[in-house]
Amino acid sequence: MRSWLLVVLTAALLVSSGASALAIPSLGGPTGIALLPTAKIAPVHEWQTAVGYRSFRTTYMYAAEDVDMSLWTFNALKGVASDAELWVAYTRGSNGEDTDIWEYGGKYLLSERLLPRTGFLADTDIAIGASLGRWADALTDASEIMPFHTDIETLRAYFVVTTQLAPGNTGDWDWEGVPATRIIGTAGVLYLRVAPDALDSETLFRPFLGVEVIGQHDLTLALEYRFKDSGIEDDSLLSALIRYPIDRSTNLEVGLSNASPIGLAQGDQDLFVRLGYSFPVGAY
C-alpha cells in the first residue's frame, strides 16, 4: 500500500499553492535527491538544514534477523565557494538501544573548468564528491552471529553528471525557481566501502540514475535508482519523494526508500518525512 502513497500525495499537492523555495540536503548529506547526489552545488550565501524521521526495517547484511529501527536525522549543508560545498549528516537510531551515525563530506564542481557554459552545455554540471562516516554501536543486540556492539566505518566517493532535460535551454541553474516545468536528469557512479570493526570490509561500485520533475511553485517529484550489487545487497536501491515548498525558506519532504542508514539497499520500502529550512549567512 505504501507504493501508492506518493501518487496520493502528488494529487493532493498539485492542487495546493506554495511560494518558491530552495532545495534541502539529501538524506545522504550532499545536494541530491533522497540518498544519492546530484552535480549541483549549494549557494555560498545560505545554510541549508533539514530534520527528519525515518522508519526502517532491515535484514541487514550483518544481522541474522529482521531489525526495526526509528531514525531521527539532521543535515546541514553550505556552499563554501561557487564550485564547492561541505556538509554534515547525523542520525540517531533506536531499536531498543540507541545508536549514532555521523557522516562528513564535500563535493567539487568540475564543469566550471571543463565545460563551456554556452549552448546545451550551459545546463550541464559535472562533480566529484566523497565522505567518511561512522555508525557507532550498529544494530546493537540484533544479531545471533554478532551479539555485541560493533562500529561500522564507511567511505563513499562518486562521479556525477546533472543536466536539464526540459525545457531545452533556460539558462543557468536557478535556486529561486522557474515558472515552466523543468525536468532535471542525473547519472553517475558510486563507490562505497563498508568496514565493520569486527568483520571483513565489503565494497560496491555501481552506476546510478535520478530524475527530478519541478513544476509550478517548485513542487518537486523525484526518483532515484542505483543498480544492485548482488554480493552484498538484497535489491537495487530505489527512492521516491515529493518536496513541497511551504514558503521561500521552508520545505516539506515525504518519500519512500529502501536504503539502509549507510546507503546499502534492503528489500523493504520505508517512509521518511523531513522538514527543511534555509537561512542567509550574509548579504550578497
Image: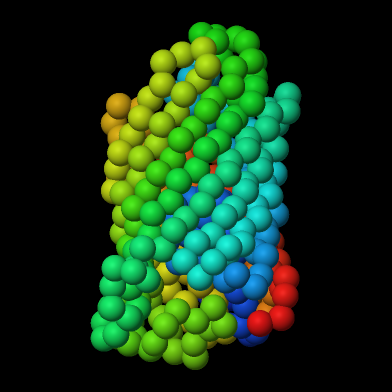
Q: Position of residue 126 (x, y in %)?
A: 34, 64
Q: Nearer the viewer, residue 5 or 193?
A: 193
Which residue is located at x 67 percent, y 65 percent?
A: 47
Which residue is located at x 44 percent, y 40 percent?
A: 156
Say whether residue 172 is left or right of residue 122: right
Which quadrant, please, contains the C terminus?
bottom right
Which residue is located at x 66 percent, y 41 percent?
A: 91
Q: Nearer the viewer, residue 57 or 282?
A: 282
| Figure quadrant of residue 265 | top left
Q: Nearer the viewer, residue 275 or 132?
A: 132
Is residue 120 among the parts visible in the rendering? yes
Say whether residue 72 is left or right of residue 144: right
| Figure quadrant of residue 26 | bottom right
Q: Position of residue 145 (x, y in %)?
A: 51, 9
Which residue is located at x 54 percent, y 60 percent?
A: 85
Task: Name above or below for residue 76 compared with residue 117.
Answer: above
Task: Name above or below for residue 239 compared with residue 144.
Answer: below
Say whether residue 114 is left or right of residue 212: left
